Amino acid sequence: MTQVISAAEAKTLLANVMKDAYPDERGRFGPFGGRYVPETLVPALDRLQAGVDRYLHDVDFLEAFHAELKSWVGRPTPLTHARELSKRWGAQIYLKREDLAHTGAHKINNAVGQVLLAKKLGAKRVIAETGAGQHGVASAAACARLDMPCTVYMGEVDMERQAPNVGRMKLLGATVVPVTSGDRTLRAAVDEALRDWVSDPNGTYYCLGSAVGPHPYPYLVRELQSVIGREAREQMLATTGKLPDSVIACVGGGSNAIGIFYPFVKDTEVQMLGLEAGGLGTGLGQNAASLAYGRPGVLQGAYSLLLQDEHGQIQETHSVSAGLDYPGVGPEHSLLMSIGRVKYEAVNDEDALAALAECCAAEGILPAIESSHALAGAKRHASEHPGKTLLIGLSGRGDKDMPTLQKTILKDQV
Amino acid sequence: MAARDSIGDAIRAAKTKGRPALVAYITAGFPRRKGFRELLSSVCESADVVEVGVPFTDPMADGTTIQRSSRAALEDGVTLQWIFAELEAFSAQRSKHGAPLLLMSYLNPLLAYGLARLPKDAARAGVSGFIVPDLPLEECAELRAALEAQGLALVQFVTPVTPSARMELLSEASRGFLYAVTMTGTTGKNVAVPDEVLDYFARVKEISTVPVCAGFGIRSRDQVERLAPFVDGVIVGSALVEVIERGEDTGAFLQSLRGEAIAT
């Protein structure tokens, strides 16, 4: 459980990844993943697993899902050639525009898929956690569309910095429960959602928003989000006639990243780069970069890399972006890093905000602060490897970040 | 005799006296590290088995009381190393026949401590077994084997939503006792103990090959009396932590649950 992966093991794991062997029947991505939950949730996860096995391969279910993605979410989202950023950064920059998906981020792909599944499983209500509020809004919208009661847990700290999204969730009919326990951000919201679920495991469906948590969530979320990478891969081939040299995405829990990476995993010539929240620096508590600075452990249902102290206590995190402000990461990312298939780096608050401003001015696009970590990472990558073609997952739009942007980028402007 | 057998023995000894065993939970180092051994000693006098909680930052199976006590203990600097040192000193001073001690911990602090050294250090500290609420049967093989080698128990849970076939597996795997959760939910809420809950306990009791103890939401003598015919023991956690929080006498509270006259 606490193993360090040797070079020989990494080779085997990589071969398994190329054979699509993960998750295995125990819900493992190599050593990572699994199902570490209270006994009360085991039957609920068994039912979810049975539902996932049945419906993710069911023609009618997939037809209903893709019909919603097309006519309600607005998919496929466009691929935009960022002409000015390409010039400035010395690379060909393409943006996969999840900011143009309904409700403003990639989160809707997962939410609509899971709420459809919740209905099939006979759930009476849906609960969700949210950090930046995007998954909360997406869940509220999907529940309104599909006629399900929805409760969203959101940390008090996040409710303040993402205030516009709180109002949106309420308008969409969701009950928003402020979380005052723990760190009052995304991780505490997940704890509270789990406590709610444990209280009614038969009637409640937990719509988890990222590729984290106990099996089968990391798999389910990957499957629902892979539409991003499948579309982007086709669009790159159609637009440029070839695959990109690198695919770049931001990573908090890692749902948009796994969604865009996964369809490229077997394209070994394509490099992949995940950008985590570097916050204010490399010290404990100053960032939310679990892959860069974390150690393996178990939090909220899965064995993965975590920001923790020597005693196994989970660390408070810091990031200017609520959506990346999480001390863990999806188990599949821990695997992809440990076998060297994806490289993960940290981007600090300042560079992310600078990239946000640059993208606004150069392309007329206001990206989410989360997505701006990917932009900043792409800029750095381009300066080190000029002339390459880079596909960037623009996971969401930045309208929700106005309270934070007023206090940072805009604070000196009259 | 393996240390884990002391747990079942203590529960059966209470049963032969015509009452359910009382399993008491306290958070290690709460309300503060100083004086913890004295508190533990007094709880051990009034309880048949004592669970010592290892505080964790994310206690997802626990309600607000144990979240609060865990946070306070962490802020006071409680670590598993400190707990083992305290328990070792405590065990050295007391009779071998005192209430058996169990450690109740989420998995991550145990992983950080290291599963290789954990069982031996726990045995040396006088611990008889472990309760790990986020470690279901399918994931527990490694820890279970390591504990077995030292003669230590790993307690399994069953809940009202556990199917009977799974209940059998959990009972077979459980050592010490079987932790039967009274309700779906987190610790600390008040439970009314309706008839269907009693049906569930009757089912658990029929299936289980080890003593059955009911936990989550036990706060009053009424509940204990209602559950008594169906279980071998009751577990009290949040209500006891609240007594400690209020600075009240733990012995008096535990005796009131046992239905004994309160010594004054």
Image (tube, coloured by chain):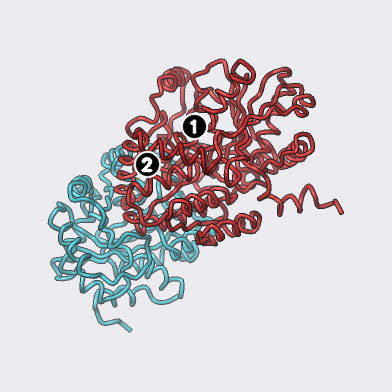
Chain colours: A red, B cyan
- Label count reads 2
> Horizontally, is A19 left or right of A202 in the view?
right
Mark number displayed over residue B176: none
Q: Determine which residue is flagged by label 2.
A: A35
Question: Residue at 42% across / 55% down in the picture?
Answer: A148
Identify the residue at the far front of this view: A71
Instruction: Give the camera-side residue of B245 and B35.
Output: B245
Q: Crowding near pointer 1: few (<14 within 10 Å), some, many (20+)?
A: many
Q: Quadrant of residue A124?
A: bottom left
Instruction: Give the camera-side residue of A41 and B215.
Output: A41
Query: Gap in Å between the C-alphas at discs 1 and 2?
Result: 22 Å
Q: Is mark 2 on a helix, strand or loop?
A: loop
Question: Residue at 30% across / 62% down in the picture?
Answer: B183
Please state which amino acid type lies under the numbered disc 1.
Answer: Ser
User: From the image, which quarter does the N terminus of chain A lie in?
Assistant: top left
Of circles 1 and 2, the one toward us is 1
Instruction: Judge whether A397 appears above or below A167 on screen.
Output: above
Instruction: Judge whether B15 appears above or below B7 on screen.
Output: below
Question: Residue at 55% across / 44% down in the picture?
Answer: A327
> Horizontally, is B204 left or right of A326 in the view?
left
Q: What element carries label 1?
A: loop
User: From the image, which quarter does the C terminus of chain A lie in?
Assistant: bottom right
Q: Determine which residue is flagged by label 1.
A: A226
Residue B156 % position (x, y): 27, 50
